[in-house]
Amino acid sequence: MVSNRTKAWAVLLIIVLGVVTLGLGQTKRATKRTRPKKTTTNSKALPAPTPAAAPTPAEPDPVKKNERHDVPVEMVQPVKAAVNAEAPHYTYEFTQPASTNTRILIEHDGAGRGTITFERRTYADPVIDPVQLSPAAWTKIKGLWESLHFLDSETVYQSERQYPHMGNMRLKLQQGARVRTADFNWTTDHDAAELVAEYRKVGEQAMLVFDIIFARDSEPLSAPDLMRRTEDMLKKNQLSDPGQMVPMLQDLSVDERIPLIARNHAARILKQIKK
């Protein structure tokens, strides 16, 4: 049998263990109550956002004005050239529907300055270019007009024999209220024949220059043929004043857009003109 002392020690041990267990439980509950809760707030406080400032409305563009207070109004008006009603106006016209150049019209003033219009069967529209007679050509042409006394004369320039296949030629001179026109396809009048011959040279040279410029810009491979044509016309005295073509030929002689053979030919023609 177990002694009373042993029982007493056992009871005391149980009491001590119960007291310890009770104390531990109270401590654990207290710890749970006092534990701080976790927060998602950053350790550093962020500054409050500043509200965006309202956009400043754009100022309207200032109204443009065309005022020029520093210049009188009458000074900015276009100046019209004075027109002399008595100034002479000269016209030469050639027409031949069967020809390559079906129509050539040259109109100019008393200084040899005007326009040339030509039509070709291969062109849908006429070509109109400015023309300026050289001093030498204009001196010759003006002298022939004066020799004809065109406005004061009633001479019929058409010969008895007709050559319509040669094309029709028309001369016209207007000066003030006075005007006269003469048509013929062939004439035996020396001055009239010389006058149309000089105008024909003016037209041939102008059309040749047009063809060369066109070839240089659009059809460079045709330049050799045009140089041969230029030299042939120069030898046959079919150009009004070859000296007018010198600047263009100088450019052609160094223009790499056209074949070398054409450039060399242009240089040779220049030497012929400058002789």
Image (spheres, helix red, strand yellow):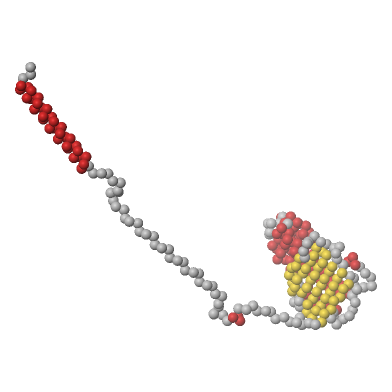
Out of 29 and 228, give the one closest to the viewer.
Answer: 29
Occupied quadrant, residue 68:
bottom right
> From this viewpoint, is residue 271 visible?
no
Q: Position of residue 39 (x, y in %)?
A: 28, 46
Question: Viewed as shown, does residue 51 lie left or right of 245?
Answer: left
Q: Residue furthest right?
A: 160
Out of 16 and 162, give the one closest to the viewer.
Answer: 16
Out of 63 and 57, give the one closest to the viewer.
Answer: 57
Out of 148 and 23, give the one closest to the viewer.
Answer: 23
Q: Position of residue 32 (x, y in %)?
A: 21, 40
> From this viewpoint, is residue 14 visible?
yes
Identify the residue at image location x=84%, y=68%: 95
Question: Viewed as shown, does residue 232 lie left or right of 220?
Answer: right
Q: Is residue 222 above or below residue 239?
A: above
Q: Position of residue 37 (x, y in %)?
A: 25, 44
Identify the residue at image location x=90%, y=67%: 164
Q: Considering the image in quadrants, where does the C terminus appear? A: bottom right
Identify the residue at image location x=58%, y=81%: 72
Identify the residue at image location x=28%, y=49%: 43
Q: How many marks?
A: 0
Q: Is residue 246 above or below residue 13?
A: below
Q: Position of residue 274 (x, y in %)?
A: 74, 66
Occupied quadrant, residue 148:
bottom right
Occupied quadrant, residue 217:
bottom right
Q: Considering the image in quadrants, where does the N terminus appear? A: top left
